[in-house]
Amino acid sequence: MTTPALAQNVKGKGRHYQHPTTGELVPSVTNVLNVLNKPALPRWAAKVVAEQAVAMRDSLTKLDEAEAIDMLKGAPWRSSTRAADRGTTIHAYLEARMQGLDPHGISGEAARFRRAADAFLEEWNPHPVHIEMTVFGPDYAGTGDLWAKVDGRLAILDYKTSKAIYPEAALQLAALAGATIDADGNPTVKPDEAWVIRIGEDGYEAKQVADLDYNYEAFRACLQAWKWMNEGGPYT
């Protein structure tokens, strides 16, 4: 993915965007959604460490204790980085295809996902309206992968390369759909529908956000919790 327009990292508070009309820094959608509990993450991290320990069971005995601990505790971060690189490659491939380009071959892990990406484009035939567009609500911002006409309806689509589609993706799309202006301060058009498209080694999967307004209300609740944690705080 390209670097989102107007984005910057605020120390201790994550990614923010500079609002094009007020100049204020507002949190990104994904930053806001970090307030949600993600119970699968600790289990995933534990599994990655266990797998690393088994794979290195012979060589770990040759390291001193501190080196072995450092090696194992870094396993989830190394795995996460590889997944992020794969996701970036697939996003760039789909973006290029939407721009009418014929990107060069994909190498590495991402190559196994290309067939699913091509199948999605062939079967859905989305007609792009906006690609990688940054949009703003009154007190938040985010960048969406694709706004496109699908069967004559305006849809916002977000690509994932994770092993599953998680609930917070619906909140992410609802927030983007509920934004009111783009990075230039121009009004945006609310999409008719929103879809999460998971691109995997085993094919692609599509899930539609059931109720954009309801999910937007849930996002606003997350945003309120984020402000409580980062701006107001519980104590004097």
Image: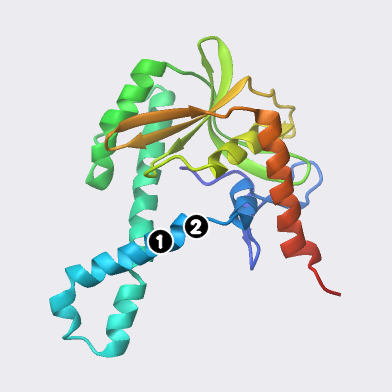
- Which residue, as the protein is rendered here, is positioned at the far bottom? 64
Residue 124 horizontal side relative to residue 224, left or right:
left
Residue 27 horizontal side relative to residue 169, left or right:
right
Vertical side of 7 occupied by 146: above or below: above
Marks 2/1 in contact by CB < 8 Å: the verdict is yes
Image location (x, y in percent) of residue 115: 26, 29
Vertical side of 190 occupied by 230: above or below: below
Vertical side of 225 occupied by 76: above or below: below
Residue 43 is labelled as 1
Q: Which residue is mark 2?
A: 39
Residue 107 horizontal side relative to residue 85, left or right:
left
Closer to the camera in the image, 110 or 54: 54
> What residue is shown at x 31% (from left), y 63% (from top)?
48
Image location (x, y in percent) of residue 93: 36, 34
> What residue is shown at x 36% (from left), y 16% (from top)?
123
Closer to the camera in the image, 70 or 12: 70
Image location (x, y in percent) of residue 169: 54, 40
Closer to the camera in the image, 205 or 177: 205
Residue 40 horizontal side relative to residue 135, left or right:
left
Crowding at mark 1 (Cα within 10 Å: few <14, some 14-19, many 20+): few
Vertical side of 34 occupied by 220: above or below: above
Kindly identify the amino acid type of the residue bearing the numbered disc 2: Pro
Closer to the camera in the image, 42 or 148: 42
Crowding at mark 2 (Cα within 10 Å: few <14, some 14-19, many 20+): few
The Cα atoms of the two marked residues, 2 and 1, are separated by 7 Å
Kindly identify the amino acid type of the residue bearing the numbered disc 1: Arg
Quadrant assignment for the C terminus? bottom right
